[in-house]
Image: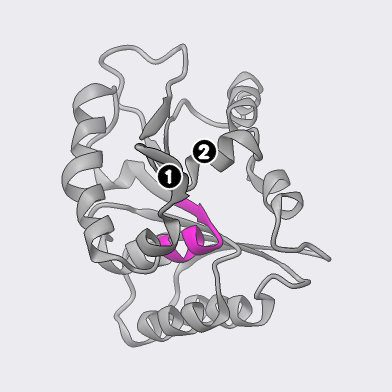
Amino acid sequence: QYRVYRPESATADAKLPTLYVTDGQDYLEYGNFKTVLDNALTNGDIEPVIVVFLDSRNPDNLEENRRNSQFLCNTDFAYFFANELIPAINRDYPVSVSRDGRVILGLSFGGLNSACFGLTLSEVFSGIAMQSPANADHVKVVRKLYEEREKLPLKVYLSAGTVNDNYDEVKRFRRTLEKKGYDLTHTWVRKGQHNWANWGPLLDD
């Protein structure tokens, strides 16, 4: 399941950039992301954008959240994005079909998924956004992969809290990205923890 945010001003022939959001149901419920987008557009802080909120729950059983299997560098999940979801959005919504107009965002394991998509789908996404990628062991593995690979054509957003939020390993990941010369924006949330009190206030960023 997924929900799509489409600005009221979007015409049928617009070629808008697209933000794909994993754990979309939580970004809408706990992050109040629709209101954040409405306000940013009204204030002129951002250009119009299509946002795809992907629900990680089993549509036949909403009690079953599949994120733990989907988000850990799952090649089938990447294949689903590249070959099913993105073509469907390209067909049904006024979006740019260029990779330059596509970004993937996620938090916790979803943040790790964004890092994985950077490695496996850099021809599909030009930007990856990671809020508190988790956990330390997984981030360490991904960090080493970025260390070993040639620099990819990606813009990167990375954030973490400084308390109980995998801060040390995320900081090492940041250093690796900086050393490689990535176009990187990072935010440390002082006393921020692994929760929506940390993530929610950063959504306008």
Residue at the spot x=22%, y=37% of the render?
Answer: 97
Residue 153 rendering spot, x and y as whole percentages: 32, 63
Observer-nearest of 55 and 79: 55
Whole-percent x, y for residue 65 in the image: 45, 51
Q: Quadrant of residue 11?
A: top left
How packed mark 2 is, by other alpha carbons closer than 10 Å (few <14, some 14-19, many 20 or more), is many
135 relative to 82, above or below: below
Magenta span? 105-113
For the N terminus, the quadrant is top left
Mark 1 closeness class: few <14, some 14–19, many ≥20 residues within 10 Å: some
User: Which is nearer the eye, 186 or 111?
Assistant: 111
Indicate whether residue 88 is drawn in magenta: no
Residue under label 1, please give it: 57
Residue tagged by mark 2? 25
- In the visual, does 109 lie left or right of 144? right
**SS at badge 2:** helix
Residue 201: image x %, image y %? 73, 45
* Amino acid type at mark 1: Arg
Left or right of 8, for residue 45: right
The correct choice, above or below, for 72 with respect to 85 in the image is: below
Q: Amino acid at mark 2?
A: Gln
Q: Residue at x 38, y 33 (%)?
A: 2
Q: Position of residue 149 (x, y in %)?
A: 30, 82
Say if 57 sits above or below 140 in the image. Answer: above
Tags 2 and 1 touching, CB below 8 Å: yes
- Tell which residue pokes out farthest to the right in this image: 191
**Label 2 to label 1: alpha-carbon separation:** 9 Å
